[in-house]
Amino acid sequence: MSTILTELQLDALTEMVNIGVNRAAASLREMVGEQVHLSVPKVTLVGRERAITTLAENETTNLVGIHQVFEGDVTGRALLIFPDTRSLELVRAVTGGELPLEEIIELEHEALAEIGNIILNGCLATMANMLQRNLKMSLPEILRGEPSMFFSLEPPPEAGEVVMFLYINFAIRERDIRGYIAMLMDMPSLAALQVLLDEFIERAT
Amino acid sequence: MSYRVLVVDDSKLARMAVAKALSALHPDWTRVEAANADEALVHAKAGTFDMAVIDYNMPGRNGLELAAEMLALRPGLPLAVISANHQVEVVTRAREVGATFLQKPLTEKALDEFAADAMKRLSENV
């Protein structure tokens, strides 16, 4: 399915995600006070089923996800996903580590929303700026469940299947925290994105 | 004086973007490109360039590891590592290995400052 995008379009998209996520990682680093390691992003276009299988193969436990909808010339969903078991550790990393467990649990929702917001907004805002378009982003929403749940969110896309899945691993090694970022959009949005990518390539080269 | 600049980035588009900025600033300079660390080291051993601009986030070895290897081969070589990842550890490590840290997306101004400093260092070393 990756053949939908040309090599250069995919390259441009990867580069944009790369810049966005790296910036977001720098913000996250300020929050947790430890280096946040990132894998080189792999941007692949896959179908829903493949996306679910990929997550299910790598993760055996339930997952927690922070979800934001973006709207504009391109519309879709952005997800930050990591294993449910590590979610409290992530909150502990952000809150400084000295808080008792009850307070960490109390803060979990808020802290996850904030982390998701920083990473996803950082990523989407960078992409929007580079594409010279405005993207409206919804407030972060926390979801928990199995891999399939994250790729079957209501309402279903109006036109065609959700086809785009891009992921990057981020890790805070000292705390054994890692996660994925996925973006989902439908065919019309993907077509709109192609036009914007071509304009971007034209400006950049 | 015309210089040769090695541009190392796994992204073709990113190399094209550096090329654009470079040719706006110094149209007479020559550009050498490498898509990964191994290709870059071949150029470093052959001495086909005077300064290098290296992407940080590459598969295999990252830009800072490559910068350290290149400086071991050619001490004093002016090097810049480009990344959007301006975490303290990355910026500090760049300084430690002797590379200039440049933010991504690269601006002409930042590249100009690096090039000016590189030219100064190269002319002093001659």
Image (cartoon, rainbow, N blue to C red):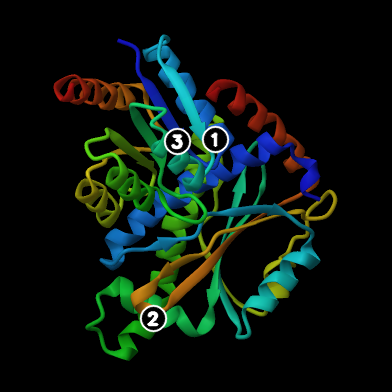
- Badges 2 and 1, same chain: yes
Q: Mark 3 lies on which chain?
A: B
Q: Nearer the viewer, residue A129 or B21?
A: B21
Q: What residue type is labelled 1?
A: Asn
Q: Nearer the viewer, mark 1 or mark 3?
A: 3
Can the viewer see residue A133 in this picture? no
Question: Is the Cβ of the residue at disc 2 closer than 8 Å to that at disc 3?
Answer: no
Residue at position x 35%, y 18% from top?
A: B3
Residue at numbered disc 3: B43
Q: Is residue A127 left or right of residue A10?
A: left
Residue neighbourhood size for the residue with mark 2, other residues' Cα within 10 Å, grouped as few (<14), some (14–19), many (≥20): some
Q: Which of marks 2 and 3 is in front?
A: 3
Q: Is residue B114 left or right of residue A163?
A: left
Q: Can residue A183 be seen in this view?
A: yes
Query: Do marks 1 and 3 share a chain?
Result: no
Instruction: Indicate the position of residue B18 as horizontal and vertical percent values.
Output: 45, 27
Tell me which residue sits at (43%, 75%) in the image. Answer: A177
From the top left corner, tell me how far across and down residue A133 is, in percent. 56, 32
Q: Distance between the residues labelled 1 and 3?
A: 42 Å
- Residue A134 got which mark? 1
Q: Between label 2 and label 1, give the one nearer the viewer.
A: 2
Q: Looking at the picture, tell me which residue is in the foreground, B115 or A74.
A: B115
- Residue A96 is marked as none
Secondary element type, mark 3: helix
From the viewer's side, name the closer residue of B16 and A63.
Answer: B16
Identified by mark 3, the residue type is His
Residue at 62% of width from left, 79% of height from top? A59
10 Å crowding of disc 1: few (<14), some (14-19), many (20+): some
